[in-house]
Amino acid sequence: MSTITISQTTASKSDLKVVSYSKIVRGDADELDTLRKACEEYGFWYLDLNSQNGDPISVVQNVPSVFKIVEEFFDLEDAEKTRYDVDEIGPWKLNGYTPFGRNKGLVGDGKKYGVEGYTVSNPCIRTVGAERV
């Protein structure tokens, strides 16, 4: 049996790492190392969504389209949304709808908490705006 030690680390805003999304996508080894260190040291980081020349990249440009698609999906009737149930459409639970209240809360009281959601895997995220799936 292994033991995991969790310690509290206090980080100021200036201590947090800034990680470039465009460099990560290109596989930049130094940026991947920065991301790894940020995960190990603090567990989170600032994500720079600008391209190398400072222009917003497609992730930022697609935000309005993503919000529109999300709004349209969650406005559907429950029966329609459950056609995309994450537990029913695939064995790996990588994509799909989770209805409100399905997951148990973290307080251990056995009650169901949560919000409805839709999980989208990384390959799907990269194609948002290119086509609707």
Image (cartoon, rainbow, N blue to C red):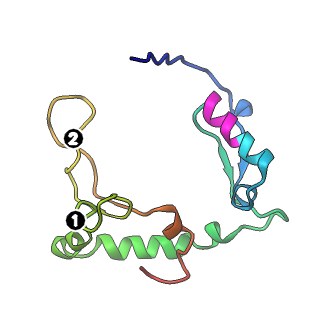
Identify the image quadrant of residue 27. Answer: bottom right
Rendered residue at 49%/16% (across/down): 5
Answer above or below: position of 101 versus 81.
above
Q: The C terminus lies in which quarter of the figure?
A: bottom left
Answer above or below: position of 9 versus 31.
above
Labelled pair 2, 1 in contact (Cβ < 8 Å): no
Give coordinates of residue 8: x percent, y percent: 54, 18
- Residue found at the far right of this picture: 53
Give the magenta-colored segment's residue range.
35-41
SS at circle 2: loop
Answer above or below: position of 95 versus 41.
below
Q: The N terminus lies in which quarter of the figure?
A: top left
Give coordinates of residue 103: x percent, y percent: 23, 46
Q: Give the residue type at disc 2.
A: Lys
Indicate which disc residue 104 carries: 2
Rendered residue at 82%/62% (across/down): 52
Answer whether residue 39 is magenta in the image. yes
Residue receiving disc 1: 88
Answer whether residue 50 is magenta in the image. no
Give coordinates of residue 86: x percent, y percent: 28, 62
Give coordinates of residue 106: x percent, y percent: 28, 33
Is 14 or 98 nearer to us in this picture? 98
Q: In this view, does 91 lie to the left or right of 108?
A: right
